[in-house]
Amino acid sequence: MIDLRGKPKTREQEYNFSGRRKFLVLFMMTCMLVLMGRAVHLQVLNKQFLKAQGDMRQIDDVSVSAYRGMIKDRNGSPLAVSTPVESIAVNPKELKAEDKNQLRQMEKEFRRKHNIEKLTDRDKEQVMADFRQEKALKIRKMEKLLNLPAKKIANLLNEEPLRPFAYVARRVNPGLGDQIKELKLAGVYIEREFKRFYPTGGVSAHIVGFTNAEDVGQEGMESGYEKLLKGISGSKRVLRDGQRQIIDDIENIKAPVSGNDLELSIDQRIQYLAYRELQLAVSANKAKSGVLVVLDAKNGEILAAVNQPSFNPNTRSSLKESWYRNRALTDVFEPGSTVKPFVVAAALEGGYVSRNATFATRGVYQIGRNTVKDVHNYGTLDLTHVIKKSSNIGVSMMALKMPPKYFWDVYHRLGFGTSAGSGFPGEANGSMLNYKNWHDIDRAVLSFGYGLNCSALQLARAYTALADDGVLHSVSLLKREEDDDAVRIFSTKTAKSVRKMMETVLMKDGTAYEARVDGYTAAGKTGTVKKADARGYAENSYFSVFAGMAPANDPRLIMVVMIDEPSAGQYYGGLVSAPVFSRVMAGALRILEVPPDQEETMPVLLTQTSQ
């Protein structure tokens, strides 16, 4: 054999080359045998190891909750916000099953502690007993952390058949969720969610409403604007450990889309003022309930709408379901004498009475077999004094001068018998008998507010036709600059004339002297309405109502106050509801920085210089 240099190879060189080749072949065969042996060991002899490792790390796709849009007042103050929380769920099947990984770890620890290589059957029984005891202690600790009844989870484990999934706590603090994770219990899951928080508590509860455990709107604007507020959930791919807990995020599959914010027309400053004063009035008069609505006279925005009793939407346990109802918008009552200004306006507008007309009331007025009465015999009254003294007889005489269809049409155009259209869920329509079925007595009682039903919001809306010089506004719970749906009901001259008459109601010899507003002119009308029952009208059960506006010369705000069943001695609207109007109106006008138009009535603040 010849080498690379052309010289013949020696026997020694040939032997060395052959040896290296044999070594290389032997080395490669050895590596292959090692790899094959390892594969047999893992796949056949010790396959449980790989299975355990696979069980410990699993890839899964999970939903990512979307942030629900905020609800704000007109100035941006938050009324409803979402905060991150966690919910605790269990899979009883997994929780009941023995955790092999944990059990194997305890067996390993037992062997190390007792310095033995292999466990006897008795040792295995001891480890199993310790394992079950430790698991029971962890479950009880979890129950205590979540403030669950004892054996709550144990009862889930004893059900037949076992449920695949059950929540044991919803919307808990993330810190509490971390403590649950540290227990490392198989079959216990921590889900990230959002909890709705209402910073103003009961002040705006009836308007804003609340969501349920699934973060779906149930009442109020939360329910009415669910589609706008609700976001779109996303998804992500995660890595779970043996206890099914998420240990790492792998990738985002679809990003969640946050819900839209909702800006209300409510001014939280006025809302709070109205809430406080109504609460005091209902308590002082030992009333069943009360409502108060404030409208912007220029565009129909609802600046405040409060109810008593109220509730805290952040803690709703042990509350009556009836307290959730927004009575100001959903409940109806007979408005009583608060509709009398509309009768006078309708009669003037239609030319059925002149501005200098008078009415001989004499205290009693017979209409067929029925009798209409006034509280006193007021004698002969002009239009202004019909309003000032709240004469049932005077407005009945006017109503009988108007054709039924015309009278009904004015009431209907003012919004009685139809929804105010604020968009609030469950808003009341009210009711009013069709004019085709009217008798003379029907026209009479309708003129002083019986025989029809309306909500406080509907009544307040009707008053915009007098406050804004004859223009009736639609109402809105959403912030807006102008009202595109405004319609004219009365002429400017008629509206101003009636408004001037209503100013006299707040004079000392009127029915609502307690309604006057310091620093401002005001106009309004009282209503003291007997409540209907199964037998007709109750003798000692009343709605006390006041509706008014200020400043009277150019109204900025309209307010309706209704107190249901005052029982502390007084029940007249001018004594029960009018003082609430006075305090809230004075504060609201100052909040909005409306200049006083009657400075001589402003309170004087006295200061004393220290000596």
Image: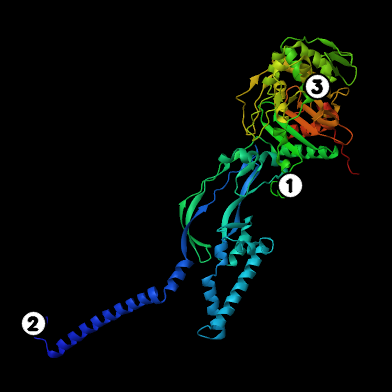
Q: Amino acid at mark 2?
A: Gly
Q: Which mark is residue 319?
A: 1
**Element type at mark 3:** helix
Protein image colouring = rainbow
Horizontal arrangement in the rendering, residue 25 relative to residue 188 (left or right): left
Residue 250 lies, in percent from the top left, at: 46, 59
Rounded to the nearest angstrom, the CA distance separating label 1 from label 2 is: 108 Å
Name which residue type carries label 1. Leu
Amino acid type of the residue that numbered disc 3 sits on in the rendered structure? Glu
Res 152 visible:
yes
SS at circle 1: loop
Number of numbered discs present? Answer: 3
Residue 382 in the image, given as x and y percentages of width and height? 83, 13
Q: Which residue is mark 2?
A: 6
Nearer the observer, disc 1 or disc 3?
1
Q: Residues within 10 Å of mark 1 (few under 14, many from 20)?
A: few
The answer for how far apart the CA atoms under marks 2 and 3 are is 132 Å
Q: Is residue 581 above or below residue 182?
A: above
Tag shown at residue 503: 3
Q: Is residue 469 visible?
A: no
Q: Where on the picture, by quarter, is residue 578?
A: top right
Looking at marks 1 and 3 on the same chain, the residue that comes earlier in the sequence is marked by 1
